[in-house]
Amino acid sequence: MSATVFDVAFTPASAPAGVAGSVAVVIDVLRMTTNAATLFSLGLSELFVVAEIEEARAVAGASGALLFGERGGVPLPGFNGGNSPLEHTGDLAGRKALLCTTNGSFAVQAVKDARAVLLGAIVNAGSVAQRALQLGAERVLLVCAGTNGSPSLDDVVGAGCIVRAALRGTGTVALTDSAKMALHIANQNTDLEATLLEAAHAAVLEGLGYDRDIAFAARLDSLPVAPERTAADPATFRLLG
Amino acid sequence: MSATVFDVAFTPASAPAGVAGSVAVVIDVLRMTTNAATLFSLGLSELFVVAEIEEARAVAGASGALLFGERGGVPLPGFNGGNSPLEHTGDLAGRKALLCTTNGSFAVQAVKDARAVLLGAIVNAGSVAQRALQLGAERVLLVCAGTNGSPSLDDVVGAGCIVRAALRGTGTVALTDSAKMALHIANQNTDLEATLLEAAHAAVLEGLGYDRDIAFAARLDSLPVAPERTAADPATFRLLG
């Protein structure tokens, strides 16, 4: 069996044009994809990822979905909540939600031509790596959401955790130089929270009072779910694996 | 005194548009900027960096410069040598040379709007960091040459060595997330050659018989020179510091 190549794009814009035949994994550790994994772990059945606020309101109104999102880390008026994985209370079994964030939602749009799209983070690194390999593509492209077009350290740590999990699987995995870099960064410190705290975006979240979100996002494999884009709609994710 | 911000572009294309006010450091560890540092250490007075082969021949013919270069790692016909830092024999005092390579020459063109341009590698990391700080810009952008548009591990190791040297200086240095990533990668292994050997381009060079070039490129601060673009011509480098 030929190897599955794991590659990393440090920003959505640097995702190669050849994403079409690949499995793409969108990674926004602080906080969109960590939040998505949390929502599914609480029983959510379906998640819509939308970048524009007005579209988010319209879709939520039509579908009865809960509406979560932020701009600049701050919850949006009229929404059911912001982008913190720690604000969800109670059972979400069977509910639908809509998530409208800045960088993560844009990254999902940037990989729309991929064969499959997963939402990955540190909290679900192992599950996402396993599902990506299960999908049988020759190439898995880990797309870091970044911050306003620049690479974010937190996302690259997440990518490195997924690469490491893939290497521990049963299949044959090959790494590009970018994937090796992400692996080095994830392996630098066994205390993943310490590495996340170095990220510029961690300081922003701390300034907004979201310190606990960073510790939560650093818990490796604490939420074993792999949110995956549905075939019917490129903005809709479910647990399909 | 305000901090000097060190940033890293993992490929020339991802160098921010705002390179104009910055000091740019072009990094092509395997092998263009390692070779450039070697040439100046052997006494070279002036280096022309050119991307196109025909332009290289024309410039060399007019200037009497030695002509070095490669395509795909292989020396070009009619040139005085390829791109190996180990092929230079004898004293180059007062000589001029022209270097025509694939990725490094392109990266030099990509930062033409920078306030100053240095050629950096592992072999001259400390000297380049010191000169970059001496130039007094608010921002130093380390531009990794990469390989055909994708990031190369060897260049990012070089960027991390320059970041580390800058942090050890006397000035106040701030790092972007990208600069922190490069630092993590350089710090991962004290054996820099082992990290370089992981790079995809290292395997290409080994296949061409250039194994010793990799060990040579990994010798931290072995060549204390900082080749710098002249004010007169954006393709001409000298030792100005």
Image (cartoon, coloured by chain):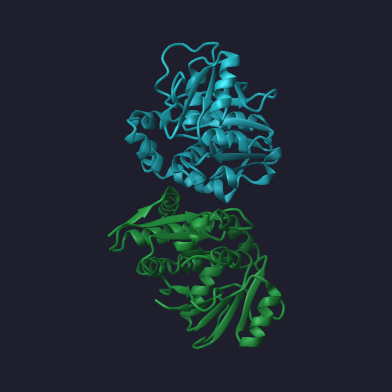
Chain colours: A cyan, B green
Q: Is residue B165 left or right of residue B216?
A: left
Q: Is residue B195 left or right of residue B1?
A: right
Residue A181 versus residue B234 in the image, above or below: above
Toward the viewer: A193 or A26?
A26
- The residue shown at (64%, 57%) is B148
Q: Specify the quadrant of the image occupied by residue A190.
A: top left
Tell me where residue B176 appears, x and y as whole percent.
Answer: 41, 50
Q: How many marks?
A: 0
Classify the position of the C terminus of chain A by image quarter: top right
Classify the position of the N terminus of chain A by image quarter: top right
- The residue shown at (51%, 14%) is A43
- The residue shown at (47%, 55%) is B8
Tell me where residue B195 appears, x and y as whole percent.
Answer: 49, 55
- The residue shown at (55%, 32%) is A105
Residue B150 versus residue B21 in the image, above or below: above
Tell me where residue B37 appears, x and y as whole percent.
Answer: 48, 74
Residue A165 makes an appearance in the image? no
Residue A199 versus residue B147 in the image, above or below: above
Q: Specify the quadrant of the image occupied by residue B135.
A: bottom left
Toward the viewer: B120 or A32?
A32
Residue B211 makes an appearance in the image? yes
Tell me where residue A211 appears, x and y as whole percent.
Answer: 33, 31
Q: Is residue B13 left or right of residue A151?
A: right
